[in-house]
């Protein structure tokens, strides 16, 4: 019993840390990948100096060092859990110094849970968490100085630590200043001069104002932070709320009255766990995180998981639909299962280009796989340039380098590879590619580079994302081994409902090498075209399986008798080209959803 009474608090904290690690490693693993892919931590002196050249640079540098470990997602999740563990324990230690009773220990998890919910926004940078942990250490140090040092040391602490912490940690320095201000006024028994509180507040604001004279950023960003949110021009209100909470939370706990541990502790634990789980759940379940998850699965080439995810919940945005179709393509099922999933026209295969850092990546991956190497490189480059905090991307650098190698631009590739060689997890890949440069035999023998060199169109052509059928036709006729290009071409005409062009392009499929069966969606389209011009299947020149002829008859009978017949909206008739062409045409036009930019 004594053992439990002595160690129950640290045990609860460890359980919390394990839960946080599981959260990041399982449902939120795509957020770990998202953070990792939009930075490129380099072990160079220039990189270190570049980070420390701006306010908050040290917190940013430490956070980026930690974030690179997200490449091994289990390690990344454990490191984040460790940060949350330290954050919660420091919250309690600071409150404990304010004479908070042990019975209120479960409430010390509230700031950590709120911060976890806030970080479900993928653009909240880990540097904010790191900065808060470090400023809490300074708050603990102030407690020691305030209790055990004389006035000269206290003043010296404020004079030295506040500007130094602002430059190294950023505007979380204001949390420290606010805490000092409240601490002095709330602890009159310790006979601290109120002028220390007033001086600390004025000095903190003056520090930011002085720095503003030498920095190009607007004043509101210097007060709100340059590195705490991926979009620097935006200061989220939850960030401000968290900073205020950290400053006042110890004093709020001190106001709580005494309570019986046997009653208060279980009630707190149940309330904190239930409320925290609900808050994190609803904060995490957003459209933006759904898009990030699809992008992560594409990065991992987890084609089965993408299809499984779409089977559980139909995708609706162009980015999601394009990822599902890409996965079907990679599994050789695109034109077999195309209409088992929601389709929104050509954008469901190739989303319209937008200048953001997410949607061009998956589209670029599609172009890359199809052999449209130059177009893929352009999309990768645009995605990297769209990163709002001007970081480089290890993932995008890899893809750009691969495109340059395939195109034979070895000088450009070598320059980028030398930069990548200073990273931790991309250096081995960079060294392997450096050894390949100029070795045409080795490059051509590579299973990916060699194949894409055969697929890519070597002659110049004008790319048009509004005429993707022509682009795909060029790619396929350049190399008939590129069956994916043919299936994308056929799928494009089908989702565009352009039967004229479909029938024009269909004959070139004889070079695609189908031996077992014609893809089901193509069979359905052929049957549909035939029945538009003939009254029976007699004399039909295509190898159509009997099941599609029978289903076509059922569809026509149901459609002609009652277009609202439930049989038309249930499988197998709902999963056909005929249903998409006739039943869902108006719905598809009226409810097309655009990909939400992850801002």
Image: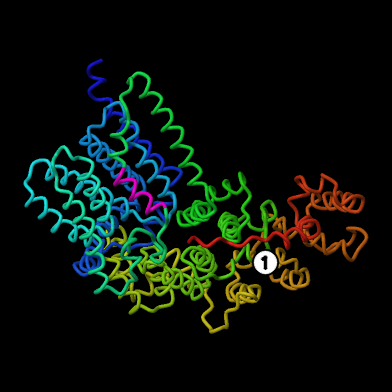
Q: Nearer the viewer, residue 229 or 485?
A: 229
The residue at 21%/54% (across/down) is 198
Number of marks in the image?
1
Residue at the far top in the pictured view = 1
Please check the rendered image and state whether residue 243 is part of the magenta-colored stretch, yes or no. yes
- The image shows residue 370 at horizontal and vertical percentages of 55, 67
Please check the rendered image and state whether residue 311 is part of the magenta-colored stretch, yes or no. no
- The image shows residue 17 at horizontal and vertical percentages of 33, 37
Q: Is residue 4 left or right of residue 158?
A: right
Q: Quadrant of residue 405?
A: bottom left
**Quadrant housing the N terminus:** top left
Q: Nearer the viewer, residue 409 or 321?
A: 321
Of helix, strand and loop, which one carries label 1? helix
Q: Quadrant of residue 161?
A: bottom left
Provide the residue span drawn in magenta: 238-248
- The image shows residue 455 at horizontal and vertical percentages of 53, 72
């Amino acid at each position: 019993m004594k053992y439990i009474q002595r160690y129950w608090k640290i045990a609860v904290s460890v359980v919390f840390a394990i839960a946080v690690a599981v959260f990041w490693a399982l449902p939120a693993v795509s957020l770990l990948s998202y953070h990792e892919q939009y930075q490129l931590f380099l072990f160079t002196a220039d990189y270190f100096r570049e980070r420390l050249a701006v306010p908050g640079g040290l917190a940013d540098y430490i956070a980026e060092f930690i974030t690179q470990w997200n490449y091994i997602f289990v390690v990344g999740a454990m490191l984040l859990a460790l940060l949350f563990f330290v954050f919660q324990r420091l919250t309690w230690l600071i409150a404990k110094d304010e004479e908070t009773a042990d019975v209120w220990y479960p409430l010390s998890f509230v700031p950590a849970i709120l911060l976890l919910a806030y970080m479900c926004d993928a653009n909240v940078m880990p540097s904010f968490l790191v900065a808060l942990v470090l400023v809490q250490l300074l708050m603990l140090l102030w407690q020691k100085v305030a209790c055990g040092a004389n006035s000269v040391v206290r003043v010296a602490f404020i004079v030295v630590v506040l500007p130094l912490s602002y430059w190294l940690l950023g505007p979380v320095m204001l949390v420290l200043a606010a805490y000092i201000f409240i601490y002095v006024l709330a602890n009159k028994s310790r006979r601290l001069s109120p002028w220390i509180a007033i001086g600390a507040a004025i000095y903190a604001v003056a520090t930011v104002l002085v720095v503003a004279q030498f920095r190009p950023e607007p004043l509101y960003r210097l007060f709100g932070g340059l590195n705490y949110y991926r979009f620097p021009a935006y200061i989220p209100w939850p960030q401000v709320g968290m900073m205020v909470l950290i400053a006042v939370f110890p004093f709020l706990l001190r106001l709580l009255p005494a309570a019986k541990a046997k009653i208060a502790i279980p009630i707190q634990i149940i309330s904190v766990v239930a409320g925290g789980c609900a808050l994190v759940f609803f904060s995490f379940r957003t459209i933006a995180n759904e898009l990030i998850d699809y992008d992560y699965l594409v990065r991992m080439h987890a084609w089965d998981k993408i299809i499984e995810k779409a089977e559980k919940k139909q995708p609706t945005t162009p980015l999601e639909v394009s990822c599902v179709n890409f996965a079907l393509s990679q599994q050789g099922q695109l034109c077999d299962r195309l209409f088992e999933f929601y389709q929104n026209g050509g954008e469901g295969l190739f989303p319209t280009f937008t200048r953001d850092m997410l949607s061009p990546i998956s589209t670029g991956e599609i172009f890359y796989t199809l052999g449209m190497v130059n177009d893929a490189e352009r999309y990768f480059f645009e995605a990297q340039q769209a990163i709002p905090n001007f970081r480089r991307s290890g993932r995008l650098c890899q893809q750009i380098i691969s495109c340059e190698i395939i195109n034979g631009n070895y000088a450009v590739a070598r320059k980028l590879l030398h930069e990548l060689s200073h990273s931790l997890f991309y250096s081995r890949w960079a060294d392997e590619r450096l050894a390949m440069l100029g070795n045409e035999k080795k490059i051509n023998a590579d299973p990916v580079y060699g194949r894409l060199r055969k697929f890519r169109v070597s002659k110049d052509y004008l790319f048009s994302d509004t005429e993707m059928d022509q682009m795909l036709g060029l790619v396929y006729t350049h190399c008939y081994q590129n069956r994916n290009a043919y299936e994308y071409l056929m799928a494009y005409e089908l989702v565009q409902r352009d039967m004229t062009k479909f029938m024009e392009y269909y004959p070139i499929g004889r070079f695609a090498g189908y031996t077992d069966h014609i893809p089901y969606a193509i069979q359905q389209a052929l049957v549909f075209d035939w029945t538009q011009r003939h009254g029976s299947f007699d004399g039909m020149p295509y190898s159509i399986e009997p099941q599609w002829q029978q289903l076509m008859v059922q569809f026509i009978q149901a459609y002609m008798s009652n277009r609202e017949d439930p049989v038309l909206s249930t499988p197998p008739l709902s999963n056909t080209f005929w249903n998409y062409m006739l039943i869902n045409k108006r719905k598809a036009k009226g409810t097309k959803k655009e990909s939400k930019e992850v801002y």
